[in-house]
Image (cartoon, rainbow, N blue to C red):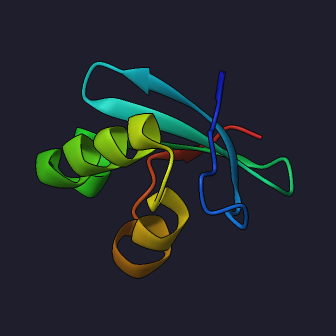
Amino acid sequence: MKPYRNLSGRSGVRAYQLGLDAISVEFADGSVYLYTRASAGSAAIAHMQALAEAGRGLATYINRHVSERYAERLR
């Protein structure tokens, strides 16, 4: 997993991993969730991937738009 840059300094996201039409997100509590095109939609995955690479806004986006639309809890 790649460390999340957390430019705001207060994100609940610790790290992420991009996949083809998917993103795994590790949160500050150590939990890891997999979001996929099938679970969250193509547009949401593309947006989450862009936010992850930018290092800002990912936790807020997840909380507001896709919180329960994960494919699987990995940890």
25 lies above or below 43 = above
From the top left corner, tell me how far across and down residue 59 is, in percent: 54, 64
From the top left corner, tell me how far across and down residue 56 is, in percent: 48, 55
Towards the viewer: 12 or 23: 12
| Residue 70 falls in image quadrant | bottom left
Image position of 38 (left or right of 13): left
* Residue depicted at 70% across the width and 62% down the height: 12
From the top left corner, tell me how far across and down residue 16 is, in percent: 58, 34
Image position of 33 (left or right of 51): right
The answer to whether residue 29 is visible is: yes
Task: State which quarter of the image contains the N terminus.
Answer: top right
The answer to whether residue 67 is visible is: no
* Residue depicted at 38% across the width and 20% down the height: 19
Towards the viewer: 6 or 14: 6
* Residue depicted at 48% across the width and 72% down the height: 60
| Residue 20 falls in image quadrant | top left
From the top left corner, tell me how far across and down residue 10 is, in percent: 72, 67
